[in-house]
Image (cartoon, rainbow, N blue to C red):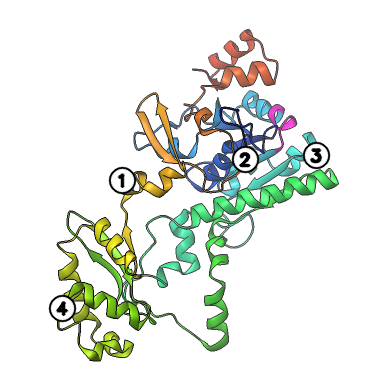
């Protein structure tokens, strides 16, 4: 156990990552590396703002130093190649043609640093008939068929709402880079990794592929309902957009629920049989909803849990941030941002040797560490920096 007050350096301290990623999947992977102590240098185009009013980039780009660098200029590309020579990992998620057009391919970079590990995360990979198409997380989940597995009926597929392909792809990148680093430690050689954003969510649906290929199985689309339990779903409670979910998994739980609700219709002997409850599920849901409508979600959750019924509040974002359990585990990170004040963000779900959250750095704006990176890492002078700024190659703040 780390003694209280002692600074945690992080298990990835000493690792340098060049981050060319945008949007969500790539920045998530590099953010995790930064949380665990790696030195992440985010390469940003000076013409494209990074800090946004919605705070999204603040969530994904903490613990990174930023250099505003034009890679389409000769001097800018040369600076990137100099950084490559002293780095361990390069990660990007442009369309395939971008890195080719800049002549910053793995073959070029490996000649400069044969130990470099490069990870590309284009929408559909670097090869194949879709390779030049752009993609986002929602594109990836649609290709995988996820919208066809969720929703309230089979007539209208529904996306997840969280662009599921992005976080899965980001976590895949984080994991495979660790295996590549281990391989390099053993063999001394780097490697190139091609992760197709669109392939990542498909790899999480193995049971559906297997079932369909075996006997043509097609899943039943029924919203929050269950084929095996009833009642099962989410019910509105008192207040605006307040909900609770319950799952009655056996006859004992159903008996207990009817005792609590004390509704003669629900107390019918017929409904002690699952098949009868399932047959009249809509009517039963109406009576249960009427009872929940006047209840406080958290209070009734504890009431049901104390009687052995599976129940839980369906938290909105604000409720999640104030969740007693997560706060007791010190999951959240409160960060004082220059433009927004103190904001609370998710911390690290993987309990381990990440750097102390009290020392985490907020998102840097484009070019905030340009001078530090050029002068301290590459040995540039103040005159060099001034010349680069005049020609528009590097942005300094």
Q: Residue at x 40, y 55 (%)?
A: 162
Observer-nearest of 333 and 3: 3
Label located before the other in sequence (3 or 4): 3
The percent position of residue 382, horizontal first and vertical second, equals 62, 9
Label located before the other in sequence (2 or 1): 1
Q: CA distance from mark 3 to mark 4?
A: 73 Å
Mark 1 = which residue? 318
Mark 4 = which residue? 263
In this rendering, is residue 74 above or below 151?
above
Q: CA distance from mark 2 to mark 4?
A: 53 Å
Mark 2 = which residue? 353
In this rendering, is residue 4 above or below 230?
above
Q: CA distance from mark 3 to mark 1?
A: 48 Å
Observer-nearest of 67 and 35: 35
Label located before the other in sequence (3 or 1): 3
Q: Residue at x 18, y 61 (%)?
A: 295
User: Callout 4: 10 Å neighbours few (<14), some, many (20+)?
Assistant: some
Label located before the other in sequence (4 or 1): 4
Which quadrant would residue 371 be assigned to in this image? Answer: top right
User: Callout 1: 10 Å neighbours few (<14), some, many (20+)?
Assistant: few
Which mark lies nearer to you, 4 or 1? 4
Which mark lies nearer to you, 3 or 1? 1
Magenta residue span: 82-88
Mark 2 near mark 4, Cβ–Cβ under 8 Å? Answer: no
Mark 2 near mark 1, Cβ–Cβ under 8 Å? Answer: no
Disc number for residue 114 = 3
Relative to 186, 293 lies left or right: left
């Amino acid at each position: 156990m780390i003694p209280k007050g002692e600074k945690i350096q992080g298990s990835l301290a000493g690792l340098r990552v060049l981050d060319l990623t945008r949007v969500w999947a790539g920045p998530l992977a590099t953010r995790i590396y930064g949380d665990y102590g790696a030195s992440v240098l985010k390469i940003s185009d000076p013409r494209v703002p990074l800090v946004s009013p919605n705070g999204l980039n603040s969530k994904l780009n903490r613990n990174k130093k930023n250099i505003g660098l034009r890679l389409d200029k000769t001097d800018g590309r040369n600076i990137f190649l100099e950084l490559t020579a002293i780095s361990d990992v390069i990660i990007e998620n442009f369309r395939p043609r971008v890195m080719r057009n800049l002549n910053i391919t793995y073959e070029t970079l490996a000649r400069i640093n044969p130990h470099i590990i490069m990870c590309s995360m284009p929408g559909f990979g670097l090869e194949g008939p879709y390779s030049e198409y752009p993609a986002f997380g929602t594109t990836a989940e649609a290709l995988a068929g996820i919208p066809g597995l969720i929703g309230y009926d089979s007539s209208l597929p529904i996306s997840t709402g969280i662009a599921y392909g992005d976080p899965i792809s980001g976590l895949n990148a984080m994991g495979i880079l660790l295996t590549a680093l281990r391989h390099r430690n053993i063999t001394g050689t780097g490697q190139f990794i091609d992760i197709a954003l669109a392939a990542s969510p498909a790899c999480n649906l193995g049971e559906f592929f297997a079932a369909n290929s075996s006997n043509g199985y097609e899943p039943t689309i029924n919203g929050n309902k269950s084929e095996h339990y009833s009642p099962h779903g989410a019910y509105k409670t008192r207040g605006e957009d307040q909900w609770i979910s319950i799952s009655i998994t056996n006859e004992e739980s159903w008996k207990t629920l009817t005792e609590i609700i004390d509704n003669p219709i629900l107390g019918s002997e017929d409904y002690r049989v699952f098949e009868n409850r399932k047959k009249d599920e809509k009517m039963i849901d109406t009576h249960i909803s009427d009872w929940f409508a006047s209840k406080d979600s958290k209070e009734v959750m504890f009431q049901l849990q104390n009687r052995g019924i599976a129940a839980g509040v369906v938290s909105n974002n604000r409720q999640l941030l104030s969740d007693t359990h997560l706060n007791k585990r010190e999951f959240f990170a409160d960060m004082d941002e220059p433009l927004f004040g103190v904001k609370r963000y998710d911390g690290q779900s993987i309990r381990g040797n990440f750097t102390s959250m009290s020392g985490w750095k907020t998102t840097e704006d484009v070019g905030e560490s340009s001078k530090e990176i050029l002068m301290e890492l590459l040995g540039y002078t103040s005159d060099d920096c001034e010349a680069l700024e005049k020609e528009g190659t590097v942005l300094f703040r």
